Amino acid sequence: MNQSFITFNLSLCFSQWSNYIRATVRKEKGLPVLVELLHSDADKVVRAIAIALRNLAIDQKNKDLIGSYAMRDLVSNLPCGQQRPAKNLEGDTVVAVLNTILEIISENLENARFLIQGQGIQKLVSINRTSQSVRETKAASHILQTVWAYKDLRHTLCKAGWNKTHFKPAVSGLPKKQRNAKQGNDDITLPLMEKNQGHCFLLLESDMFMRLLHS
């Protein structure tokens, strides 16, 4: 697979051109192609697809579709605490997946419900409490807090054995120096629309993009 990336600079996230790109990917049935590639064993592929889906999810219709059809695949790429998935994804990729999940559940109750149904809470709580990565813990914590904020989901969560304490930020046992690392503008860790420059990037490997165009 060609490892060179094609980068689309969607710098004006709500511009007419950016909206056109997102809608075109959906209308040309590109979303299923991207979701299928989440099954890849290649770390860089999973990372690129997670970032692409995150940017595409700015479009509400895309967000709904990605939540419905990609949530279980996104969750499957998460570690269970310190235990990494069989494909052994790098930390940057795990954080990218976490931030994609955060994007698609934000202001979307049904997608948060899909996360619960996809057994995502167990992995998120485990990452929040046991991960040795500050960035993974921070990203997982953001998701958990977002889920708990949906009052309509609390009965379902409590019935499954979860309570408010599971959704609180964990107190890190890491050294202070490491806890304070990467507290700046980390594009992978920060929610998409909070980047300093307001830039959004849709990353696709070249042959993936060609498949997308010809789908």
Image: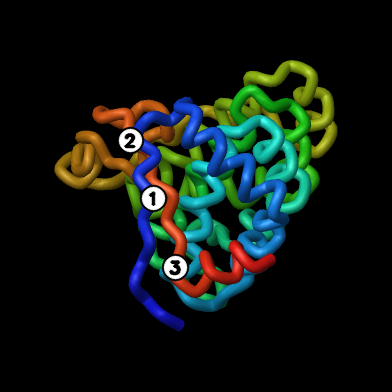
The percent position of residue 60, horizontal first and vertical second, equals: 66, 30
The residue at which mark 2 appears reads as 199
The residue at which mark 3 appears reads as 205
Q: Is residue 11 above or below residue 3?
A: above
The percent position of residue 56, horizontal first and vertical second, equals: 56, 43
The single residue placed furthest to the bottom in the displayed view is 1
Check disc 2: other Cα within 10 Å, few if <14, some if 14-19, many if 20+: some
Amino acid type at image mark 3:
Glu
- Where's the C terminus, which quadrant? bottom right
Q: Residue at x 50, y 51 (%)?
A: 52
SS label for mark 2: loop
Amino acid type at image mark 2:
His
SS label for mark 3: strand
Mark nearer the N terminus (1 vs 3)? 1
Disc 1/disc 3 C-alpha distance (Å): 11 Å
The residue at which mark 1 appears reads as 8
Check disc 1: other Cα within 10 Å, few if <14, some if 14-19, many if 20+: some
Amino acid type at image mark 1:
Phe
